Image (cartoon, rainbow, N blue to C red):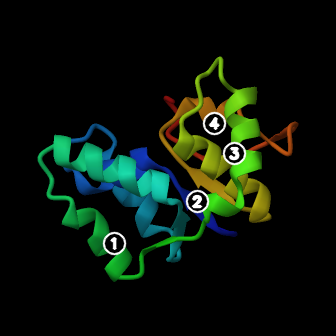
Amino acid sequence: MRGEVLLDTGPLVAFLDQRDPYHAWARDAFAGMTPPLLTCEAVVSEACHLARRAGQPMHTVFELFNRGAVRVAFRLDNEIPQIASLLDRYADVPMALADACLVRMSEMVTGSTVFTLDSDFRVYRRHRREPILLLIPPDR
């Protein structure tokens, strides 16, 4: 895959949980990517919560960071006005904080692709009007 990959919660949890219906898809997609995948702290928080709920120890999430496969590359405190604007614009979806951070990251990282299971990214726009490049299962 060309360009930076921005990692959302869904594929991260699916990769870690072999019982997840998208595990094989996420595993195969990860295999074709050049690390590190970029993400935000909101995704890490969601992934820890969901991994734990799925019976996976939270440290499995952090192992990907320790191996250099994933890296946090976003500072929320530097982007508060832009994030607030996105959350307001997409309040009817509703947009999660992690989604807003990834949309903002897609605006900041030219040519990036969002790796997600979330079909809401088909609605979101970078810079108000540009579709976001997605790596998403065909049934989503």
Along the polypeptide, which appears first: circle 2 or circle 3?
2
Q: Which amino acid does label 3 sit on?
A: Ile
Give the residue at mark 3.
83
Mark 3 neighbour density, 10 Å: few (under 14) some (14–19) many (20 or more) = many
Mark 2 vs mark 3: in front:
3
Identity, as a three-letter code, of the amino acid under mark 4: Phe
Q: Where is residue 10 in the image (x, y as percent from the top left)?
A: 41, 44
User: Which of 73/119 is in front?
Assistant: 73
Residue identifier under label 2? 6
Q: Nearer the viewer, residue 44 or 60?
A: 44
How far apart in space, not on screen, are marks 2 and 3 (Cα)? 16 Å
Tell me if label 2 and label 3 are in contact, CB under 8 Å.
no
Q: Which mark is residue 64?
A: 1
Give the secondary structure at mark 2: strand
Q: Do callouts 1 and 4 mark residues in contact (Cβ within 8 Å)?
A: no
Q: How far apart are the alpha carbons under marks 4 and 3? A: 15 Å
Cα–Cα gap, marks 1 and 3: 26 Å
Give the distance between the C-alpha atoms of the residues marked 1 and 4, in whole angstroms. Answer: 24 Å
On the rendered structure, is 109 left or right of 46? Answer: right
Name the spot of residue 102 as percent of width and height, x first: 62, 51
- Quadrant of the drawing holding the N terminus: bottom right
Could you tell me which residue is drawn at 18 percent across and 48 percent down? 52
- Disc 4 marks which residue? 121
- Mark earlier in primary sequence (4, 3): 3
Q: How far apart are marks 2 and 1 (CA)?
A: 14 Å
x and y percentages locating residue 24 in the rendered image: 31, 50
